[in-house]
Image: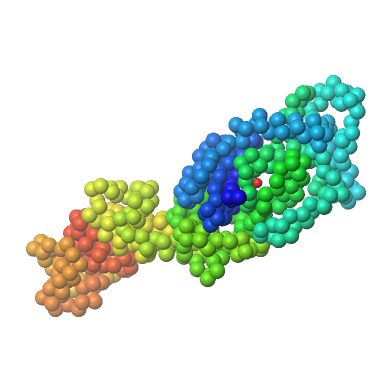
Amino acid sequence: MSVRVRIAPSPTGNLHIGTARTAVFNWLFARSQGGQFLLRIEDTDLNRSKSEYTDNILNGLKWLGMDWDEGPFYQSQRLEMYREKIQLLLEKGLAYRAYETPEELNAMREAQQARKEAPRYNNQHRHLTPEQIEAFEAEGRQAVIRFKIDDQREVTWHDLVRGHVSWQGQDLGGDMVVSRAAGKGDVGQPLYNFVVVVDDADMAITHVIRGEDHVGNTPKQILLYEAMGIKVPEFAHTPLILNESGAKLSKRDGVTSISDFQNMGFTAEALANYMTLLGWSAPDAQELFTLPEAAKLFSFERVNKAGAKFDWDKLDWINSQYLHAKPAEELLPLLLPYWEQAGYGFDAETDSAWLLPLTAMIGPSLTRLKDCVELAHFFATPTLDFSEAAKDQLGKAGVAGAIQAVLSALKETQIGQPEDAKGLINQVTQSLGVKKGLMMRSLRAALMADMQGPDLVESWLILHQRGYDQQRLQAALSIAEG
Ligand code: GLU
């Protein structure tokens, strides 16, 4: 039977790194098996689901390269089917209506806590008489629908990551709510644990691959599969993503959604690559691969049980490897939005003559895309404020003459290539009889207004293309001449 897996995000927030990592593992497994990867939007919670979150999730998955073969399916459009299945459970006597008010359920919980017992529903409405039901309904109470759980049952499965897992029926919290707000004669709003089973069965999912936080739902879902006479799929519960201090990565850690990572300047390839390593490792410890390459190596044997610590340094390193390998033509469109945001006014159409060399020059210094803002600030405005170090340099003996000589030479010499600029520097240095070091430091101070920065000759060529170099040399000259 061909492998079918799914990612089933709830649109109650932006695409979370944990969900995205689960998507990556599902995708890798589907591709490694020649199977299908489905996308299902679990939007039954109408109060918390928002279409902007759905958009964020779809865009994030697409951006990461998680192409899906079927879907997106929306649970909100499938309610009729869930309701029919709930009705069947009721008819078979596998589920029933329970009428406790929230206050009564609270009192039950408090009494259990006072007795130092784990909170659970005590199944007290399992065997209501028709008269009791009628009385509750006459009172206007709203029912929930509870699925019967046998306390004596042991539920076990072989988890593809965690191995043998076993749960006792008595630890599942009593008969479980599969639908709420069930008014007289209707079955109400079906809930997650129920609809996920109906959908996974309807979509012929063979392997349910999801985060470890769902491991406690699995025994309940297995009981539902059995009750509905459906084949139980395989399960794989992937390790949680932990922060630096070993706790579950959460909103408190700042960045958690894929769009946050995108805004911070990580590329899709690097982030997807890094996510493959959050809980899985390649047989030969290889760390850099595209998703299709990782799919060739992926297996659940190499997925860890232990939580996966989020390692910013590793993510930065992987991102820098991807950025350094990108040709300027590919990198430039990724940098332009950051420059635009910084107000630099660089224009991809008219400025490409110097934007491409600028991109090629700073590319090897990038760790995150947004680093391009700092690295390109030298080129954003015609003149810059001179740093103290640059002013010191410009105040040294002989500097004014050197700059003046460069300015004069520039009037007669075309500088289009690094050799031209180097030739001009050599010529002026020799004719003035100044030291090369002094000349280079003075040019850096004059052109970049600082003593540190990117390659001087390449920067000069870019400034020359922009028509900024003579202006800067002139401004430096005024300072040098004091
Ligand atoms: N909607 C659930 C979630 O986002 C899906 C869990 C599952 O994969 O079964 O966590």
* Residue 170 % position (x, y): 85, 49
Q: Is residue 142 visible?
A: yes
Residue drawn at the location 10% of the way across and 64% of the way down: 413
User: Is 386 rendered above or below residue 97?
Assistant: below
Image coordinates for residue 475, horizontal then vertical, percent: 21, 59
Residue located at (88% from left, 51% from top): 116
Q: Nearer the viewer, residue 455 or 274?
A: 274
Vertical relation: 139 (above or below) 328: above
Indicate whether 390 appears above or below 214.
below
Disc count in the image?
0
- Work out whether residue 431 or residue 210 is closer to the camera in this orientation and state it: 210
Quadrant into which the C terminus falls: bottom left
Q: How is the image coloured?
A: rainbow
- Taking depth in this image into account, of 257 and 44 the one nearest to the observer is 44
The residue at 66%/55% (across/down) is 237
Task: Report if residue 472 is visible in the image.
Answer: no
Considering every residue shown, the one lying at the far left of the view is 412
Q: Residue furthest top?
A: 138
Task: Kindly give the residue lying farthest to the front in the view shown.
Answer: 1
Q: Where is residue 44, by image quadrant?
A: top right
Q: Is residue 382 left or right of residue 175?
A: left
Image coords of residue 441 (percent x, y)? 26, 72
* Left or right: 221 in relation to 205: right
